DNA sequence: TATAATAGTGACAACTATTGTCACAAATAC
DNA sequence: GTATTTGTGACAATAGTTGTCACTATTATA
């Protein structure tokens, strides 16, 4: 094997293994330890952050793991990647902020001049708009980490009734039109709840020793399972015009209930928790003639009440 | 210079220049032409798609331009890039669809096992939700291309009054909550208009010879300039509760008019085209008690009319 | 404290790869 | 026909790589 090939493979192996000895590599590549030592020195000079310790149980280590892919991206691919990262800049809060921007600038830096020109030209011609929010989301990393490692997190949460301390076990986090949400098991309510991350006043790993539950079947790809197992359900049925369908498509909660007809119109049908009535009443009022609520009666009542209130206000 | 270094630099140069001769490179690198020929053959074997023509004005060319960056991404950066690209999968239509997914799979393929594991773990724990829409956007590439190259595009556009043919000069395209929009100069209305891309029934480069205007000062980063210079303006003033502010933050059109107070409440204030009254009336009705419209009177009148209509419908 | 495991360096000879030169073939634009 | 260009083959000179050996130094552990 040629030296350059060996170096490439070394990079890969070194990154995969994280910890290794010179002898190991020597036998793996069928070369002398001296050669491997020289190779490692060269890798080091090329920027791979190697660190070594002598003695038994010593060996080499890679410090901040790097992947060094000599990947051949086509120009089109580079552009696509660039704009994907670029789209993230609209999020003022991310669980990996600094990384995405540094990756972006690296990418930009290494691109050849004409690709760069092309990107500059495109920058002001295409955008993925995400509403810029004033709300603050300082605990995204903690929540994400808690979701990945299935830990119990202690949060202070601000709801209509004031601030309360809760133990939660996050399922994940997601952003929707510029706001971050965290579906989680709530040890207080003993059920799944959706938390708005900007209402979380503090968050930290729980130290009281509450045992995490086995919620591995719950994840973001499994929306059905994230519906709280509440008692008080009722049946929703709403007729929608073509415009109404499009407006409902934009709402996260509606996706499982929305049905479309060939002509573009459609309807909403499905279970709904009774506590959502105030929200839905206001929402369907906002759809105006594009929605016709048929049931439940409680929802219709609430809508009538609200309409009367607004008539009074603007009348 | 060592051979491997030279090869790396060769890749870069070759990608930047697109067209070159062996002699040029030989003098640039201070080696013989024979060496360069050997190098180019090696690059070719490594996958760089080189093509050559003999004779005067002949030379080498790179076929599909590739950038081959030996970029050292840290693990964190790789993860960030991955999720940025991953977020794009929610868009069923993109002006560069295939590229982003192929880039993503390449990235995934070249990642070392443990980074891959980490990504797999995160995949179901974090998401950027963008509403999945039924609407179709088949002409994004044409519009984007038109915007970049400042060409005149002939479209058939479906508005309330039916389908009409128009000549437009796109400023750019942007996606907002799953729908694509195209601000463009409309040669029919002789002004800037915002087109919804799912209402475009056909699009193609114009062949009638209409001269493009010099609109280089217009781009997506310059929202103020994209407001149509209409005659019929009126002044909007709306008082907002804290909730109302948050709901307005989510609307693309409101960003320039939204003002916030320290306590979280705020107000909307600014010019608005009169033709937007129907839309705004419905929108503010949807905000309910979180918005109090003060002016213009025409807007208040329309709201009252709509409220009465809804009272009748549900009453 | 001795021992084994580990990294690290220097020198040198054997081996391998790279390079330049030269000769020549083939295509092509003008 | 001539100049320009890619492309190939052979060969010697040069440069780089590798293995071996003889060292040094550090450190965990028995």
Image: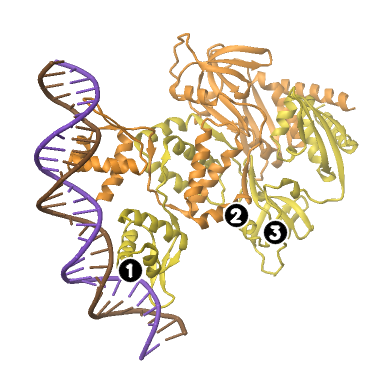
Chain colours: A orange, B yellow, C brown, D purple
**Front position among marks 1 and 2:** 1
Quadrant housing residue B259? top right
In the picture shown, does residue A184 fall above or below B267?
above
Give the residue number, with chain letter if any, for mark 2.
A121
Residue B13: image x %, image y %? 43, 59
The C terminus of chain B, quarter of image: top right
The subunit letter for the residue under badge 2 reads: A
- In front here: B143 or A82? A82
Give the residue number, with chain letter if any, for mark 1.
B33
Residue A173: image x %, image y %? 54, 27
The subunit letter for the residue under badge 3 reads: B
* Label 1 – label 3 distance at C-alpha: 49 Å
The N terminus of chain B, quarter of image: bottom left
The subunit letter for the residue under badge 1 reads: B
**Front position among marks 1 and 3:** 1
- In front here: A70 or B300? A70
* Label 3 – label 2 distance at C-alpha: 16 Å
Q: Which residue is located at x 66 percent, y 50 percent?
A: B197
In the visual, does A290 lie left or right of D7? right
State the SS at label 2: helix
- In front here: B34 or B143? B34
Q: Which residue is located at x 66 percent, y 36 percent?
A: A131
State the SS at label 1: helix
Residue A295 visible? The answer is no
Bin the neighbour count of mark 2 within 10 Å (Cα to Cα): few under 14, some 14-19, many 20 and up: some
Q: Are marks 1 and 3 in contact (CB under 8 Å)?
A: no
In the visual, does B186 lie left or right of A159? right
Same subunit, labels 1 and 3: the answer reads yes
Give the residue number, with chain letter if any, for mark 3.
B169
* Label 1 – label 2 distance at C-alpha: 37 Å
Q: Which residue is located at x 67 percent, y 47 percent?
A: B221
State the SS at label 3: strand
């Amino acid at each position: 094997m040629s030296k350059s090939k060996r170096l490439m493979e070394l990079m890969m192996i070194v990154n995969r293994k994280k910890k290794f000895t010179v002898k190991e590599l020597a036998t793996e590549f069928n070369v002398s330890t001296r050669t491997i030592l020289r190779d490692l020195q060269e890798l080091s000079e090329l920027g791979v952050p190697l660190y070594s310790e002598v003695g038994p149980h010593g060996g080499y280590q890679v410090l901040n793991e790097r992947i060094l892919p000599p990947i051949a991206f086509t120009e089109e691919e580079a552009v696509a990647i660039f704009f994907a990262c670029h789209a993230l800049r609209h999020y003022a809060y991310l669980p990996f902020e600094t990384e995405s921007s540094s990756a972006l600038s690296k990418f930009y830096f290494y691109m050849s001049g004409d690709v760069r020109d092309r990107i500059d030209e495109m920058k002001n011609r295409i955008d993925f708009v995400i509403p810029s929010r004033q709300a603050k989301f300082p605990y995204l990393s903690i929540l994400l980490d808690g979701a990945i490692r299935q830990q119990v997190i202690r949060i202070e949460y601000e709801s209509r009734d004031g601030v309360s301390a809760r133990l939660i076990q996050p399922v994940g986090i997601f952003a929707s039109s510029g706001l971050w949400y965290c579906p989680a098991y709530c040890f207080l309510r003993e059920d799944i709840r959706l938390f708005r991350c900007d209402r979380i006043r503090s968050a930290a790993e729980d130290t009281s020793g509450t045992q995490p539950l086995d919620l591995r079947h719950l994840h973001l790809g499994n929306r059905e399972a994230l519906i709280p197992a509440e008692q008080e359900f009722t049946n929703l049925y709403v007729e929608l015009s073509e415009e109404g369908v499009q407006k409902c498509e934009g709402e996260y909660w509606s996706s499982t209930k929305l049905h479309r007809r060939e002509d573009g119109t459609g309807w909403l049908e499905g279970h709904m928790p009774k506590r959502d009535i105030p929200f839905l009443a206001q929402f369907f009022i906002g759809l105006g003639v594009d929605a016709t609520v048929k049931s439940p009666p409680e929802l219709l009542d609430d809508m009538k009440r609200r309409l009367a209130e607004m008539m009074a206000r603007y009348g």
